[in-house]
Image: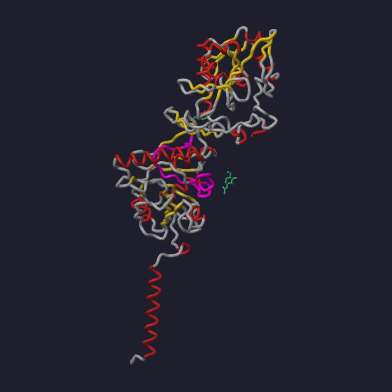
Amino acid sequence: MRLTRCHAALAAAIAFNLLVFFVLWLQPQPRSWRARGPRRGPAAGPRVTVLVREFEAFDNALPELVDSFLRLDPAQPVVVAADRLPYPPLALPRAPGVRLALLQPALDRPAAAARPETYVSTEFVALVPDGARADSPGQLERMADALRAGGARLVAVPVASANPARCLALNVSLREWTARYGPTAPGRLCDALDGDAVVLLRARDLFNLSLPLARPLGTGLFLQTAARGWAVQLLDGAFAAARQAPLATAHARWKAEREGRTRRAALLRALSIRLVGWAGGRLEWFGCGKETARCFGTVVGDTPAYLYEGRWTPPCCLRALRETARHVVGVLEAAGVRYWLEGGSLLGAARHGDLIPWDYDVDLGIYLEDVGNCEQLRGAEAGSVVDERGFVWEKAVEGDFFRVQYSESNHLHVDLWPFYPRNGVMTKDTWLDHRQDVEFPEHFLQPLVPLPFAGFVAQAPNNYRRFLELKFGPGVIENPEYPNPALLSLAGSG
Ligand SMILES: *[C@@H]1O[C@H](CO)[C@@H](O)[C@H](O)[C@H]1NC(C)=O
Ligand SMILES: *[C@@H]1O[C@H](CO)[C@@H](O)[C@H](O)[C@H]1NC(C)=O
């Protein structure tokens, strides 16, 4: 048969169509076409996004990590999240599901581009640390099943690295600005993990946290989930460690640790945690010190700003107040100045031998006639005196009393109120508009009695219960209340 021009054209068209079809068939397919694996839900496609956030740009094993997940499932969504474009550039495998999320807002990108949830469309997220590698199929799906079945809001599988995850108990108290880690009680789920683990949770839960991807990732994540009462279930099994572990040199580890410390301090500050009790018992303080300013501003209406935020005195401030009080009492005792716990300080001592947990200064009464015995007080009459330990003694600008500040920059203070006896009544010349600022019979000071306060033993009026009720009203020891209940009351602050 002779091939006509028409036949040739038809054959060419068919061949071309077949070719186009073949090329299309080779292309990566849109999500909705994807093959359905046996463990996958009816909605099709992977249920878990791998999210990598904890790595150092200067030394990491991310190419191996990402590649290990893609080998098991070429359709695996992987998001690598960094604050800014990693340098040196990451050599990530090219695959349609692999994306780099830059979390720092930039002039030329929309706000959504800096939000990690923009890059996640699966029900679950697995947070995978650098140095981990997937080596057996279905690990993430099994974790998702365990999360669905169990009572925990997060599930985790350790990484078989030099530092595999272990379980910790964690109490977070927003009111006291503290986080305390400890061993988990037998039979209890974990509140936090220490060490390397892949952690899986619902995307909706992760992105409902205040700082979902703040670094160090584990520290930030578990502080936020523990504060919400979400438990972590540590599952059996392990993810493999990278063949070439990241941060293998001493210099790289040193650099990573240094940056980690800076990040941790910034994170704790952002989450308003000022005191961390580590599992071994070590305490770590963040917040105010001798060189910093006081960590709350001028107090208005006797009600410090932190009370309105549902918080009590930051622990660093309580510590500085205790230290100042102990120092001042030591100086007064050495100089033979008769003093006694006054106001809220006496109340705290009577209640539980310490500062009231929301108090912001310490009050002591002194005998006016003893002021001349004390070099620092004599000096303060003339101007401000910085003593050899850096405490600042001065006459208060508000009236005829003395004030000892923690340091020149940190104005946490102890106030010293000079009283003198007149016809058996202790009185003074300036009065503040406070209920407790009243005259009282001298017999409360004859004799003074020892009373534990703030970690030492201070002098207090005898019969201090009657003394306190005279000043504050009946039942004051048993019924704690904020300093100015008309503005904010303990019961009303939730
Ligand atoms: C957490 O608080 C509970 C209840 O007060 C206490 O029993 C437990 O010891 C605390 N755990 C840690 C680690 O502080
Ligand atoms: C996010 O958290 C708030 C409480 O913090 C809760 O009321 C809300 O339902 C959560 N949203 C989602 C989508 O889980």
Residue at 40% over, 69% down: 25
Give x and y (percent) for residue 317. Answer: 53, 28
Q: Is residue 182 visible in this depiction of the protein?
A: no
Nearer to us in this view, 128 or 33: 128
Direction from residue 459 to residue 168 in the image, left or right: left
Please tell me whether residue 1 belongs to the stretch shown in magenta.
no
Quadrant in which the C terminus is drawn: top right
Q: Which residue is situated farthest in the front direction here?
A: 382
Give x and y (percent) for residue 177. Answer: 53, 33
Give x and y (percent) for residue 152. Answer: 50, 41
Please tell me whether residue 194 belongs to the stretch shown in magenta.
yes
- Residue 171's place in the image compared with 97, above or below, is above
- Residue 125's place in the image compared with 442, above or below, is below
Nearer to us in this view, 73 or 329: 329
Nearer to us in this view, 332 or 61: 332
Which residues are drawn in magenta?
188-212
Quadrant in which the N terminus is drawn: bottom left
- Residue 186's place in the image compared with 150, above or below, is above
Q: In which quarter of the view is residue 163 placed?
A: top left
Q: Is residue 465 visible in this depiction of the protein?
A: yes
Q: In which quarter of the view is residue 371 placed?
A: top right
Residue at 53% over, 16% down: 329
- Residue 46's place in the image compared with 464, above or below, is below
Nearer to us in this view, 485 or 393: 393
Give x and y (percent) for residue 404. Answer: 54, 22
Direction from residue 74 to residue 431 in the image, left or right: right
